[in-house]
């Protein structure tokens, strides 16, 4: 059961990343990011919201080690922390920010809690 849920979490990470990697304009719009007179924003979305998550998810599946899954959880914990700090300081659209942050938090808690002391 743990292994299956870990694999699902890594696959979700890849799936989330593929949106940013393959559809950066759609992702930018979904995240309320506005285009400027440059395409650098699309490059940033492909890199930080796309490729980073795709490669991290693939690496976790490839390594197939509890500590790799725990590190993925720590990555999600950082994302959730940033999201919730933003809710306090930036006043983003609350439902969207809390939804994204909630998904990140659930993944973080699961991946860290079940993998941190698990052996291969």
Image: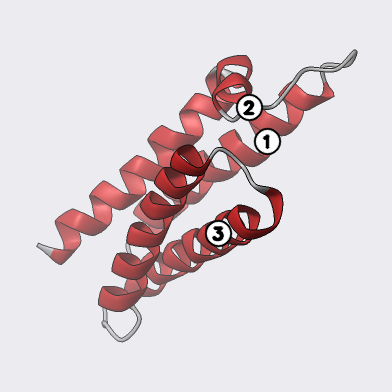
Q: CA distance from mark 3 to mark 2?
A: 17 Å
- Residue at (16% x, 65% y) in the render: 2
**Can you tell which quarter of the image residue 79 is in?**
bottom right
What is the x, y in percent for residue 3? 18, 61
Assess whether mark 2 and mark 1 are in contact (beta carbons under 8 angstroms): no
- Residue at (74% x, 21% y) in the render: 34
- Residue at (34% x, 41% y) in the render: 12
Q: Which residue is mark 3?
A: 84
Q: CA distance from mark 3 to mark 1?
A: 22 Å
Q: Which residue is mark 2?
A: 32
Indicate whether 27 appears above or below 117: above
Assess whether mark 2 and mark 3 are in contact (beta carbons under 8 angstroms): no
- In the displayed structure, does residue 56 sit left or right of residue 110? right
Pick whichever of labels 3 and 1 is earlier in the sequence.
1
Q: Nearer the viewer, mark 3 or mark 1?
A: 3
Please tell me whether mark 1 sits on a helix, a strand or a loop. Answer: helix
């Amino acid at each position: 059961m743990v292994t299956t849920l870990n694999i699902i979490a890594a696959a979700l990470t890849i799936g989330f990343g593929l949106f940013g990697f393959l559809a950066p304009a759609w992702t930018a719009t979904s995240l309320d990011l506005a285009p400027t007179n440059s395409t650098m924003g699309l490059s940033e979305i492909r890199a930080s919201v796309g490729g980073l998550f795709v490669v991290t998810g693939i690496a976790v599946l490839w390594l197939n080690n509890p500590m790799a899954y725990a590190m993925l959880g720590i990555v999600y914990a950082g994302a959730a922390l940033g999201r919730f700090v933003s809710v306090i300081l930036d006043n983003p659209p609350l439902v969207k920010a809390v939804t994204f942050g909630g998904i990140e938090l659930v993944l973080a808690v699961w991946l860290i809690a079940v993998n941190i002391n698990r052996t291969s």
